[in-house]
Image: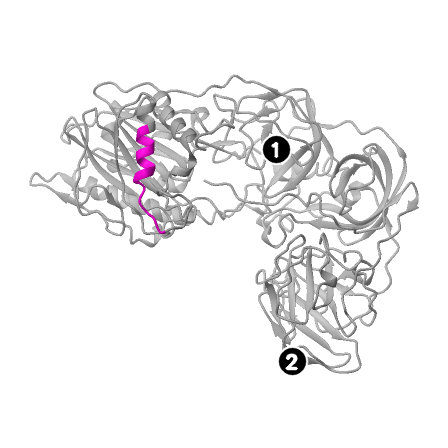
Amino acid sequence: MSAQTRPRRRLGALVITSALIASGAALIAAAPAGAASASVVITEVYGGGGNSGAPYTNDFIELTNNSSAPVDLTGWTIQYASAAGTSWANKITLTGSIAPGAVYLAQGASGGTNGQPLPTPDATGGVNMSAASGKVALVSSDTSLTCATGCATAPGVIDFVGYGAANDFETAAAPGTSNTTSVARKVPTTVADNNGTEFAAGAPTPKALTTTPPDPDPVDAKIHDIQGAAHLSPMVGKLVGNVTGVVVAKSGNGFWFQDPQADDNPATSEGLFVFTGSAPTVAVGDALSVQGTVTEFRPGGSGGTTNLTTTELTQPKITVTGTAAVPAPTLVGPGGRVPPSTVIDNDSSGDVETTGTFDPAEDGLDFWESLEGMWTGITAPEVTGPPTSFRELPVVPAGSGVRSVRGGIVLQKTDSNPERILLDDLLTPIPDAKTGDKLTGTVAGVVDYAFGNFKLLPTTPPTVIDGGVKRETTKASSPLQVSVATFNVENLDPSDGAAKFDGLGQAVVKNLASPDIIGLEEVQDNDGAANSGTTASNVTLDLLTAAIVKAGGPKYAYRQIDPVNNAEGGEPGGNIRVAFLYRTDKPVRFVDRAGGGSTVATTITTDRWGRPHLSASPGRIDPANPAWASTRVPLAGEFTWHGQSLFVVVNHFSSKGGDNPLWGRFQPPVQSSAVKRHQQAQSVRGFVDQILAKDTGANVIVLGDINDFDFAETTDILVGSGKTALIDMPRTVPVKERYSYVFEGNSQILDQILISQNLRPASSYDIVHMNAEFPDQISDHDPQVVRVIPLPSWVR
């Protein structure tokens, strides 16, 4: 399972969105930077089309001609970039002309089926705009802009609008928008090259020019009034003033401040982020009065629709009224607020922003939302996994959940561990740590949300206390037992270098006790990610087997089948596949039977005594089945151990990429990837059934990276039922030991070994915890080993 690439939360964007007022003195606004909008201007921008609650099915941009003559728009384009984006390839090509005073409607993409159709558009295109923030340029050619900032004065730009959290605009950004609001020019005939003062947020009005009344007087509000007891502010879109609080933390583009005079409702947060766009001039401990527009910021823009929003003030005017003590952190855990123990959300039916009950006492999603923006502390946090690739360290308060035997927290069917929160390095470095470690003292920071997770943003690096967890080793098998392992070696190819191969060699010999048979996942071709057309992996496997010998282990042979080039998913060019290693110094033999190929299905044949065999060994299972499109095709191998047949199938099912996050906007999370894994499980189970139909006492092992949990339907399908049911070995160990992977602090099963029933009485099984819990990994998965005694089919 590979990590998802994602940007950080708008850190360091050089944006001027307001006139900051320090100690009562207003700063001078920057000089306008305007586009050449002498005739045709952008009068309205709407990016929420089709989304939940949207009044219209499509995004749109509205233009008007303020000149006294028709303007030919042929060859012009409307171009869009995300709030901080530099790609302008997303565009609508315009045709025809626009008469003096007339309105021209350009229709963009749709985010869903909500709303009514737009009035008949004058141009259409696939522009898919963010419902909250973005940049729109009217350009007199089809040439895509290349600018990041300063686009309003780029050659060919006729008019330009940056809205919400955009990092480019005319003078200042227009207000942020939502699924239900657009930004429209207050006076369509007036052009002052200032998006911030000329545009207002309101109900979309496509093809109908309207004049917006002057800005209303700000509404006095407290922070808890703005946050409300909900995921969305009850005051979104409103101009608020006299919002008071003390600065508790700063980032590169804003700050968090908190009202020390809390209300008596723990469901309403007392903290709030103020987006300044550039480095704020306030200091921690400043007492402030702030005026601004209440906005909901959704991380990831148009690509982050599954994320929750964070409430913030934009276009702020800030008055420093003095200094004050930073409030003591609100403690979470023993002696403080106790988070829900099992439930992330159990009362929503889709979008949590529009369905369900806000219940911080029962729902973890609502609990952490009720602390959004607040200065919060966890006393002696306990580490439940290593930092992610984004330097996010998962921790829980003491006394949380069902803990693993080594200090992690175990994911279960009815417990997704809502106690977890990620310490993020946005404001200070986060140290390396492993499962079972602790952090000293109270780790304090502000609660934030981004990319499917609630985060605690400390301002001082935490100190780690070593929990003493060491890498496990397993015992060697007895002379009568054949040991069979599964090991995901994480995109292994020669470019990984000697250190990784040596580490894997040591792991096989020292930690896994040199199993007789190893099913490998994530073996890449000989030149790895180079998209050269190479599919062979002999160099990769030769390096691995040599590293095992170098580590003092036995000589291994290997068997595999090269896949069709770039047909089985994984890293482009890498040609990921599964493979077998087997020892050459033990009584384990691979039964080579010619005829296998990348697109050839191995089938079950019988000998003259009716015993099952593979038509090709090694052989691929059901490769033409659409279930295996863009996925590793399973590999079956026929082995013998002291003359007894043993069938092994190594798998690497489709990943969970594309599923809704556990902490996402949509609850319960939609697991769209599960359908394909169910089909893959049915394909493998059907193959096993063919073997057992010939001999119910056949020795069968199914193993690999199933990319699904021990309690998942995928596993149920593989297990089957009745006399031919397989035994899922992870289900045979205590819950506290049942994990092979740690994802964002959740210890969980993704890798599995299943065996036929006749192997169970003489088996022993071990998940060897040597990778997933540690920051210095040679793979992100823990291997597993089962030791069995293959028996003749007549021994039941």
Q: Label 1 sits on what residue type? A: Ile
- Residue numbers of the magenta segment: 533-546
Q: Quadrant of residue 504?
A: top left
Q: Secondary structure at mark 1?
A: strand
Lower sequence index among marks 2 and 1: 2
**What separation in Å lies between label 2 and label 1 (alpha carbons)?**
54 Å
Q: Residue at x 58, y 60 (%)?
A: 111
Query: Looking at the picture, how far across and down is residue 386, in whole percent?
Result: 54, 29
Query: Looking at the picture, how far across and down is residue 5, in whole percent?
Result: 55, 45
The furthest residue to the right:
24
The furthest residue to the top:
468
The answer to whether 312 is drawn above or below residue 360 in the figure is below
Query: Looking at the picture, how far across and down is residue 106, in whole percent?
Result: 65, 71
- As for residue 315 lying within the magenta part, the answer is no
Query: Looking at the picture, how far across and down is residue 586, in whole percent?
Result: 21, 24
Q: Label 2 sits on what residue type? A: Gly
Q: Which mark is residue 328?
A: none
The answer to whether 276 is drawn above or below residue 754 in the figure is below
**Residue, disc 2:** 96
Most common SS among magenta residues: helix
Q: Which mark is residue 421?
A: 1
